[in-house]
Image: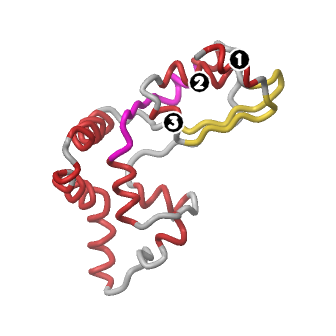
């Protein structure tokens, strides 16, 4: 694998958004992309933030979902859907109108709300790291931090703040 990475060459910009933590070997993947960045180049990554118990709970849910036969995965999907969206659905119901536009979800996200839930729940392997772990890891390899954005909690809040819905 290492030979394959080295054969790719080096680049001014290396960009990996929400991918490396799904490889099953996140730290090795982080190491691999570092080798692809030219001296003076930039590395852009997004890794799931370690949120302690919540992250461990989601890992267990994702693992359970992927172990189930396809006909039984709804047993994990429906509770996950409610966990992820109950607050927004309740707010919309109480307001009498959908402030969070479920009708336009597919246009804004590129997939339906349901498929987004399936994508989230099915995303296993699933690894996480604290921002300082990522910082230290790359600092030891000669990188410096130009910018960091962290998010913990409600997915809807994150999507609104980041204009991805």
Mark 3 vs mark 1: which is more N-terminal?
1
The residue under label 1 is: 6
Residue 135 badge? 2
Provide the residue span drawn in magenta. Answer: 122-136
Horizontally, residue 158 falls left or right of residue 96, namely: right
Image quadrant containing the N terminus = top right
Closest to the camera, between mark 2 and mark 3, is: 3
Question: Residue 159 versus residue 104: which sits nearer the camera?
Answer: 104
Mark 2 vs mark 3: which is more N-terminal?
3
Residue at 28% x, 33% y is: 56
Residue at 42% x, 61% y is: 156
Residue 88 spot, x, y in % from top left: 33, 68
Question: Within the magenta stretch, is there residue 38?
Answer: no
Distance (Cα) linking label 2 and label 3 = 12 Å
When the figure is inspected, residue 116 is found, relative to residue 63, above or below; the finding is: below
Check contact, mark 2 vs mark 1: CB within 8 A: no
Mark 2 vs mark 1: which is more N-terminal?
1
Crowd around label 1: few <14 · some 14–19 · many ≥20 (10 Å): few
When the figure is inspected, residue 133 is found, relative to residue 44, above or below; the finding is: above
């Amino acid at each position: 694998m290492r030979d394959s990475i080295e054969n790719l060459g080096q680049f001014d910009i290396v960009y990996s958004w929400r991918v490396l933590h799904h490889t099953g070997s996140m730290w090795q993947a982080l190491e691999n992309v570092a080798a692809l960045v030219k001296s003076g180049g930039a590395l852009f990554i997004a890794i799931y933030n370690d949120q302690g118990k919540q992250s461990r709970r989601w890992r267990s849910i994702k693992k359970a979902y992927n172990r189930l036969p396809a006909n039984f995965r709804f047993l994990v999907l429906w509770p996950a859907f409610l966990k992820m969206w109950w607050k927004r659905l309740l707010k919309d119901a109480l307001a009498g109108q959908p402030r969070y536009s479920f009708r336009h979800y597919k246009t804004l996200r590129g997939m339906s709300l349901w498929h987004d839930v399936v994508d989230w729940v099915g995303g296993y392997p699933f690894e996480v790291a604290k921002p300082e772990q990522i910082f230290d890891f790359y600092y030891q390899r000669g990188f410096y931090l130009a910018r960091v954005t962290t998010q913990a909690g409600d997915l809807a809040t994150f999507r609104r703040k980041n204009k991805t819905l």
